[in-house]
Image (tube, rainbow, N blue to C red):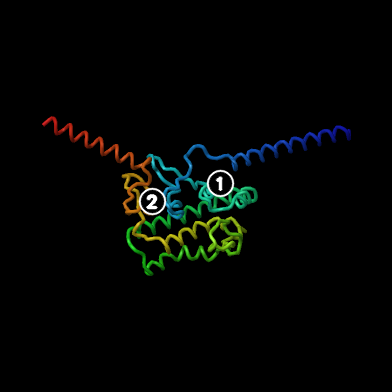
Amino acid sequence: MKSNLSNTLIKVILWLMERHIEASTHLENKIMTPDTTRPSPFFIADNRALDFLNSVAAPWGSEIEWLGDGFNLLDWLKHAELIPNSVLIQFREQTSQEELNKIAEQTRELREWFRKFVSTHAGQPLDADVLIELEPINRLLAKNNGYHQIGPGQLDSDPDRSALHWQQNRRWLTPDMLLMPLAEAIGHLICHANFTRLRNCEGPTCTLWFLDISKNHTRRWCTMAICGNRAKATAHREKKRAANTKSKR
């Protein structure tokens, strides 16, 4: 009797272990397998804050959302090089999907607040009157756990370059710290960029933003591959149509 009970107990334990391994494997695959249903994120803005705005876009008609859930957020931050790989692993392994999804939702809310600010002020210089509009981002920045340390600098032959480097670090204690590099990028853009050179792509349906750092400040398109070539093709067809119409007269 005891032997049968022991065998039954062993079978139950083995079954539970198999279910645990299956669940762990499924979670690991969900965390580590890249989403192949959409293209890689766009980093065409020449500014990380504007790249953040471009984390939702419809370059080919259908909207693509790169921050749809917590794992998407971690993936985008990794591509943007805004978090160290060790931090990425930390949050993937130690934070529940529900918690990460909440942070992703807050991230999307931050993005749309920033989109409204950029849409209102792009193309004109900023002045101190906008400070009242910036209260939300300042409240977020006040939660920052960032700090600075002295670390090793780059090794090169420049005798005037210090062998030490003033580097910024962060205590990644809670998932909401994932918002901080985005808030800092927004703050840096607002304080250091020339807002008269913030541009929305001239593609008729394109929503992508960029900072025009071209030599003559004449950039018009998000990229030639997406909208520039499309505009050229449209112009060519119109020119050809006009020529044909003229020849028939």
Kind of residue at disc 2: Trp
| Front in this rendered view, residue 14 or 73 | 73
Q: Is residue 186 left or right of residue 243?
A: right
Residue drawn at (37%, 69%) of the image: 129
Q: Measured from the top left, where is residue 144 in percent x and y? A: 55, 63
Report the disc number at residue 118. Answer: none
Distance from label 1 to label 2 (Cα)? 24 Å
N-terminal of the pair, mark 1 or mark 2, is 1
Q: Secondary structure at mark 1?
A: helix
**Label 1 sits on residue:** 71
Q: Measured from the top left, where is residue 155 in percent x and y? A: 58, 56
Above/below status of 108 relative to 38: below
Kind of residue at disc 1: Phe
Q: Total marks drawn? A: 2
Q: Measured from the top left, where is residue 80 in percent x and y? A: 51, 50
Residue lying farthest to the bottom in this orientation: 128
Question: Pointers 1 and 2 in contact (CB under 8 A)?
Answer: no
- Callout 2: 10 Å neighbours few (<14), some, many (20+)? many
Q: Secondary structure at mark 2?
A: strand
**Label 2 sits on residue:** 209
Quadrant for the N terminus, please: top right
Q: Measured from the top left, where is residue 34 in percent x and y? A: 55, 40
Above/below status of 127 relative to 115: below
Quadrant for the C terminus, please: top left
